[in-house]
Image: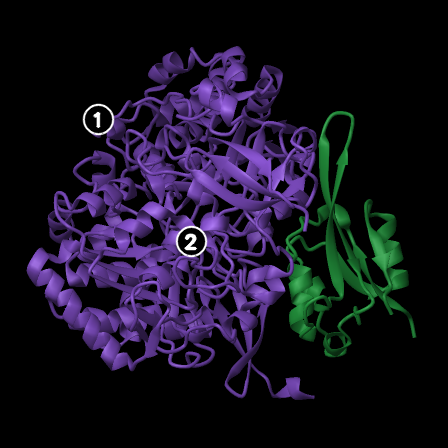
Amino acid sequence: MPRNGLLIQHDWCTGCHACEVACKQEHNFSEGMVGIKVDEVVSTGPDKVYVDFMPYTTRFCDLCTDRTKLGEQPACVKHCQASCITYGTVSELAKLMEKQPLSSIFAPK
Amino acid sequence: MAKSKENKVISTLWSAGCGSHGGCGCEIFVQDGKVTRVEGDKNHPFNQGRLCAKGLAIPQYMYHPDRVIHPLKRVGERGEGKWQRITWNEAYDTIEKRFKDIRTKYGAESVIFCQGTGRDIGGPITFLMYAYGSPNWVQVGLAGHACYTPRLGAMFATQGHYSVLDASQMLEKRYDSPEWKPPKYIIIWAQNPAAGCHDGFFGHWIIDCMKRGSKLITIDPRSTWFTTRSEVHLQNRPGTDGAIALGMLNVIINEGIYDKQFVEKWCYGFDELKERVQEYTPEKVEKITWVPKELLIKAARLYAKNKPSAIQWGEPVDAMPAGSVVAQAINQLWAITGNIDNPGGNVIARNSHGVTTYPFSSAELTKLYGAELVKKLNEKRIGANDYPMIKNFRGWVQPDVLINQMETGKPYPVKGAWIQTSNIIGGQAADPRRHYNAMKKLDFIVCVDLFQNPTSMALADIFLPACTICEKESFRSWWQPLGVSVKAVDGVGEAKSDWEINLEMAKRLATNPIKYNTVRELIDDRLKDGNTNFEKLKAKGCWEYPPEGHNTRPYYRYEKGLLRADGKPGFETPTGKIELYSKKYEEWGLDPLPYYEEPKESPVASPDLAKKYPLILTTGRRSPVFFHSEHRMIPWLRELDPFPVVEINDKTAEKLGIGNGDWVYIENTRGRVKFKAKVTPTAHPEVVTAPHGWWLPETDGRSPNFFNTWDHNINNLTSMGNQAKSGFGGTNYRSSLCRVVKMEGGKE
């Protein structure tokens, strides 16, 4: 079976945390547990200060198997307000990634 | 699998639960009479399936163990936290008796009707207030009424109607609509759109536009995700936005890069404006604002030369020293560049189908309640006689005048308060202690809310439990589309909807009979303006856009005679044009042209004070996981933003011996509060920013602690009585002076 994953175009992530709460709601995770997290990344360049956000999956991400087998998108993918997460097979995502700068693929399972 | 038994209810989110202003379509999953999940609705054009953190946390909000789900009456002293559960009938009977007594003894105007931010609550609260006969609709403590109304008032005076950035939200096919174009440039003016749905605008529509080619110009004292992605970042001194607007007008007019045809045909008073802005040269503006003149000129040129372009503005504009004057100047930018009611510009926004949930304008107020009643009530509306703009625009009380009146009892005493989903002391009020002291002397106070909070604990005599949006029927008409909210489950415990509570109270208190038996009758009556009703909208998926040619649908309505009551082309102003020289402002005794006013407290205006308090404090920094003072008790959200955090520049912090994560005091002449320092180069070296509305629901709610509101509510450092000449704006929420001091043993 092909491996599935998430392609995250992190340049578009605004740090709104919708993915994290979508994940918690879907799995009813308690405090401290979540399948995806977003960190702020601040860097000081020569002329300005840059603010970016970096979403990444954790060991608790199950790619929302319950949802995807019903044909639904994973909860974080559906609710990402910047629409910057794509679900698919790793090989499909790798093809997409060739055209998408500032992105990462996560294959949590 | 259990999920197969779930029932899915389609609805519209607005107000309690998610809390915010947006009108997101949602899917509410229900199992055994309980909401199990709330998700976005892919078929709704507003959010297109997405949902924010607050919307996704609704189930945890609904079934939170601290939620108040029965009517309560206070049995100890105010603030003692002693409550007794009572029946709805006892609650209604008590309120009826007390409010009638006050009306008989002092007049209906002696009861104030208090709401927080403008959500669907504006509908039921005004309905009840006018039925009772009081003119006093108020956001208590909201200094200078600094939340959107100053901007709305400026737009009403200048162009007759309101405008918002056109992100295709007025059209059902959204980004696929053939008539829509993305703005070439978006000026984000004093807002973090990613943090929510400010003023009913889904913030991530900006991201959608960026993906379709829109470039950014951002005006913000901080470095942010948006400034990182902006072609120009104007990092200004807080409080000086008016000078930036005037400087941009200066550049655009003097370089002749405005839309000459549009100005000739549709604007009034251009020559006067041209003369006025001459003094605001880029050199002068640089001195005032810290913004290098080259950047100001670049921003002005990019905006004016790339049509369509649009401005997305935030609440700080309302809080500027000159208040609605700053909004007027920004409005003039889109006017002289012809970026009004054009695709990708600042499109005219009217409430869908002409339906009113609550009055956004004097015209809507009159439509709902009649000219005679409005005129009569204006005579006693607090602040209306002091400020002609307050009197002639909408129906609000001026909050700075109110606090004086509560303290002095002049010209008449305030004796009662109906406070509905508003946390005055822990949230919106400037100088909350002053409000606490004044309000605790009132004879009788009702709080309608979902959780105990600093205000209800300190003040309520009766607490009525309200519903979340998933437990009630409501309707939403705020720009587009027209929508309804469907009751997915019964009220948790004995909670009732705001509409239901207020209709019942209105029936008991009205001086004229209420014509509605049920909330549904009221909603359907209001929806008649749109030739529709609740069931029809529900069957359509809970939303509808107005038909082609309707006057609430874009574009270029000023050419088509769709804006004026008389059906002639032009704008709904005395001259029929956009009034760069404002006849309305003139009529209201205000300067008809924009000008710059320095904040009362700043390194420029009060240099001696600045020696003691060298940092500029700007409050109201938004968190994407909270709405104002709400949600601090929701574990999924609190985990993401656990502390009140002040952002301070790294080099400034180093000089002060403050490390990242240290607890610090923010102090000024009005008091001090405790915040955790976030040491970051994103902060300007001379500016610190703090979020508002912090209290700790996990701590003691009783007097004097009131959930630690005195320690963590930044508004303890703000004050009343700084209102602008119009009565709108001129507060110190966004610009005052402070110092930051490390607490002893400050590291946790």
Q: Amino acid at mark 1?
A: Gly
Of all chains, the one bearing label 1 is B
Mark 1 vs mark 2, foreground winner is 2
Query: Mark 1 falls on what kind of element?
Result: loop
Count residues near mark 2 (Cα–Cα under 10 Å), then give few for <14, some for 14-19, many for 20+: many
Q: Nearer the viewer, residue B251 or B38?
A: B38
**B533 left or right, relative to B135:** right
Q: What is the C-alpha distance between the residues marked 1 and 2? A: 35 Å
> How are the colours assigned in the image?
by chain
Q: Residue at x 58, y 52 (%)?
A: B624
* Residue B544 in picture, x, y percent from top left: 44, 63
Counting from the top left corner in percent of width and height, residue B519 is at 29, 73
Q: Colour of chain B?
A: purple
Looking at the image, which is closer to me, B192 or B139? Answer: B139
Question: How crowded is the residue under tag 1: few (<14 C-alpha within 10 Å), some, or many (20+)?
Answer: some
B699 horizontally vs A48: left or right: left
The answer to whether residue B500 is above or below residue B293 is: below
- The residue labelled by disc 1 is B589
In-image side of B363 versus B34 (left or right): left
- The residue at the point 18 percent across, 43 percent down is B408
> Relative to residue B348, is residue B575 depicted above or below?
above
Mark 2 belongs to which subunit? B
Please tell me the colour of chain A: green
Circle 2 is placed at which residue position?
B426
Q: Earlier in the sequence, mark 1 or mark 2?
A: 2
Figure quadrant of the N terminus of chain B:
bottom right
* Residue drawn where x is 21% and y is 52% of the image: B136
